[in-house]
Amino acid sequence: MGIVSALFALVAAARIGRAGMMLPRRVWLAVLFVLRPAEAAVRRLVLIAARGLAPVSVKRRFGLVGTIAPADVPREPAFCLFDPLKDFSFFSGDMGPGFEEVLPGDFAALADSRFDEPLDGASLHVRLRALRLALADIAKQARRLARWTARRGMMLRGALPVRNLRMSPVRPGLPPGWRQRPAHDIDPVLHECHRLARDLLNAPDSS
């Protein structure tokens, strides 16, 4: 939570103007450098917490009329429980804004004035808010994951139509944002969370 709070402080200090969420490219990259492994670590904490819950039952959902929330009711962003699938754009040279010139960990290169170019940081800010909310209530996220697990089981049994079926919320291999050599305080956190989740997934089923 301290790391997430530091990211909010960084965004607030670097925000350009009062309207919107424009950030200098250097700050945009620095936030992403920490945000991706932080999200991956929290996903593994949720996975661990969900394993301690009793199996849940899920009813088949049917479309209902008149259940849309009013437009003036603000909704908090939902934390994404699933690792993004591996992106092989690194090999094609397409790494998004700034990556064609420098990798996120190369903070010396980020001192170049070219990295003062403003970028829209709205999506990063939404992800930060969702991450903070998830950390504040891991149990709620664990219940969300338990419901997804129950629906996945129903799809595998043919009780529900198969839609975007994934076998696990965490992707095979190393998690997003993984760095073998720690470059930030978030790295050992991710290493430990990943180890705990991997040991749990590999443990024999005692049921």
Image (tube, helix red, strand yellow):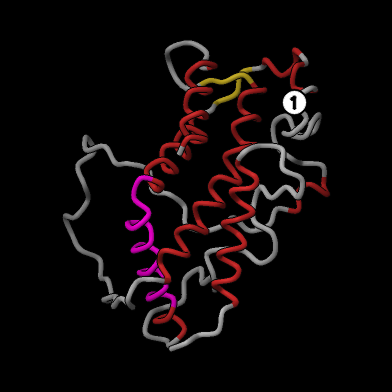
State left or right for residue 61 relative to residue 207: left
Q: Quadrant of the C terminus?
A: bottom left
Which residue is under mark 1?
Answer: 107
Which residue appears at 33% of the width and 64% of the height?
143
Q: Is residue 151 left or right of residue 119?
A: left
* Left or right: 116 in relation to 101: left
Q: Position of residue 167 (x, y in %)?
A: 54, 74
Considering the whole magenta stretch, tell me its main secondary structure.
helix
Q: Residue at x 59, y 48 (%)?
A: 189
Q: Position of residue 113 (x, y in %)?
A: 75, 12
Which residue: 51% across, 16% down? 13
Q: Amino acid at mark 1?
A: Phe
Tell me the quadrant of the picture where the N terminus can be found. Answer: top left
Residue 69, given in percent of the width and then of the height, sits at 21, 47
Q: Is residue 137 magenta?
A: yes
| Figure quadrant of residue 56 | bottom left
Indicate whether 32 appears above or below 143. Answer: above
Residue 118 shown left or right of residue 2 in the figure: right
Say which of 120 and 45 sits in front: 45
Q: Is residue 59 located in the magenta-colored stretch of the structure?
A: no
Task: List the single residue furthest toward the left.
Answer: 66
Q: Residue at x 43, y 71 (%)?
A: 51
Up-down relation of residue 20 to residue 7 (above or below): above
Judged from the image, the secondary structure of the residue bearing numbered disc 1 is: loop
- Residue interval drawn in magenta: 136-152
Which of the two residues, 101 or 66, is positioned nearer the viewer here? Answer: 101
Q: Nearer the viewer, residue 54 or 192?
A: 192
Residue 206, position as x, y percentages in the image? 47, 87
Residue 46: image quadrant is: bottom left
Counting other residues with Cα less than 10 Å from the Cα at mark 1, is it few (<14), some (14-19), or many (20 or more)?
Answer: few
